[in-house]
Amino acid sequence: MTAEQLYATLSHSGNYALKYLAKFHHDSYGDLLLVNNNEAVEYDGETYLPSNFSYSRPKVTGGVLQNGELRVSLIGNSLPELFRLGDYLMTVDIVGVMIASGEVAPLRIFHHQYGTMTVTGSMDLQISFTNDDRMGMVFPPNVFDSDNNRGNT
């Protein structure tokens, strides 16, 4: 399957949960590898554990990937331990998707490190991804003018 065929399938397929392979990483914890499947999957020398999750890919708006969401069950995996670290250093990579033949087609463009995490009442971790906002920041962060620095302007 070529890259064009894969993206056409992802873009024009029906409404069902694709079997994405997700890699959660934290420097203090290591990696947690999950697949949206009922069986473990071997890919690139690593074992992705079965889990229940849904992933909404970010959309391209103005030439930039925007948003995206991951909702993964906290039951039956060690994701709560990653969540408890709570120091904002966890990254999520969507490394591949299982195609109809059972093979894994690699995806190398979905790397997420900014967003908000919440735990729902049904024991799901919901991660709403956002983009890096550093390019929109103003330097210096404190602008001195006649309103906030009277007497020195």
Image: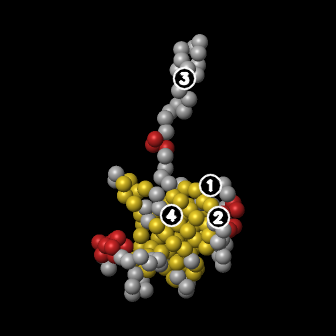
Residue at mark 4 to residue at mark 2: CA–CA distance: 13 Å
Q: Residue 65 at x, y = what percent? A: 40, 57
Q: Which mark is residue 20?
A: none
Classed neighbour count for the residue bearing mark 3: other residues with Cα under 10 Å, few (<14), some (14–19), many (≥20): few
Q: Which residue is mark 3?
A: 144
Q: Which residue is mark 4?
A: 69
Q: Is residue 123 left or right of residue 137?
A: right
Q: Residue 52 at x, y = what percent? A: 57, 77
Q: Amino acid at mark 2?
A: Val
Q: Amino acid at mark 3?
A: Phe
Task: Please tell me whether mark 1 or mark 4 is closer to you in this view.
Answer: 4
Lower sequence index among marks 1 and 2? 1
Q: Which mark is residue 88?
A: 1
Q: Which residue is mark 2?
A: 119
Label 1 with label 2: CB-CB less than 8 Å: no
Lower sequence index among marks 1 and 3? 1
Question: What residue sits 66% from the left and 78% below the top?
Answer: 76
Lower sequence index among marks 1 and 4? 4
Q: Evaluate whether residue 16 shows in this view.
A: yes
Task: Please tell me whether mark 1 or mark 2 is closer to you in this view.
Answer: 2
Name the one closer to the observer, 29 or 52. 52
Residue 14's image quarter? bottom left
Task: Please tell me whether mark 3 or mark 2 is closer to you in this view.
Answer: 2
Q: Evaluate whether residue 30 shows in this view.
A: no
Q: Secondary structure at mark 2?
A: strand
Q: Residue 35 at x, y = what percent? A: 53, 77
Q: Residue 75 at x, y = what percent? A: 66, 76
Q: Which quarter of the rendering shows the N terminus?
A: bottom left
Label 1 with label 3: CB-CB less than 8 Å: no
Label 3 with label 2: CB-CB less than 8 Å: no
Lower sequence index among marks 4 and 2? 4
Question: What residue sits 47% from the left and 77% below the top?
Answer: 17
